[in-house]
Image (spheres, rainbow, N blue to C red):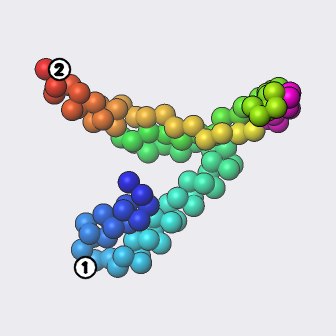
């Protein structure tokens, strides 16, 4: 699902209560706040869905795949998602139905 498909789905569900443009502003605001929180290294928890955190990755020595030359890779932060139990169960429903 793309961001525009998400906006379309929410706008359809809202019917005449909210314009597509208003839905787009809400979705953009949610994503912007999530980006801000991760940039501050805050944890984002969405019950029933999962949580997002920024994890530090230590500096290390890597290799340039083209030349094989050693390269220093600096310390950085990477976003990390942990799936919630409800989402994990929902994703696995079709699998459980086939096995049962």
Q: Is residue 26 left or right of residue 8?
A: right
28 within the magenta span? no
Farthest-out residue, front: 67
Q: Which residue is mark 2?
A: 99
Above or below, 72 against 42 in this view is above
Residue 66 placed where, x, y %?
77, 34
Residue 21 can be seen in this image = yes
Q: Is residue 42 left or right of residue 92?
A: right
Could you say which disc has been placed on residue 16 in the image? 1
Residue 92 placed where, x, y %?
28, 30
Above or below, 59 against 28 in this view is above
71 within the magenta span? yes
The front one of 98 and 6 is 98
Q: Is residue 21 left or right of residue 14?
A: right
Q: Give the magenta range.
A: 69-75
- Count up the numbered dots: 2
Q: Earlier in the sequence, mark 1 or mark 2?
A: 1
Residue 59 can be seen in this image = no
Above or below, 89 against 35 in this view is above
Query: Which residue is located at x 66 percent, y 35 percent?
Result: 55
- Label 1, residues with CA under 10 Å away: few <14, some 14-19, many ≥20: few
Residue 74 placed where, x, y %?
82, 36
Query: Which residue is located at x 38 percent, y 54 percent?
Result: 1
**Foreground tag (1 vs 2):** 2
Query: Which residue is located at x 30 percent, y 35 percent?
Result: 91
Query: Which residue is located at x 69 percent, y 49 percent?
Result: 40
Q: Quadrant of residue 99?
A: top left
Residue 63 placed where, x, y %?
79, 28
The front one of 57 and 26 is 57
């Amino acid at each position: 699902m793309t961001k525009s498909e998400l906006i379309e789905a929410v706008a359809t569900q809202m019917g005449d209560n909210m314009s597509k443009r208003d839905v787009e502003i809400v979705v953009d605001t949610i994503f912007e706040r999530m980006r801000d929180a991760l940039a501050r290294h805050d944890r984002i928890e969405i019950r029933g869905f999962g949580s997002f955190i920024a994890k530090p990755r230590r500096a290390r020595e890597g290799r340039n795949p083209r030349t094989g030359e050693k390269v220093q890779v600096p310390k950085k932060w990477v976003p990390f998602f942990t799936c919630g139990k409800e989402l994990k169960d929902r994703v696995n429903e079709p699998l459980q139905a086939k096995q049962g």
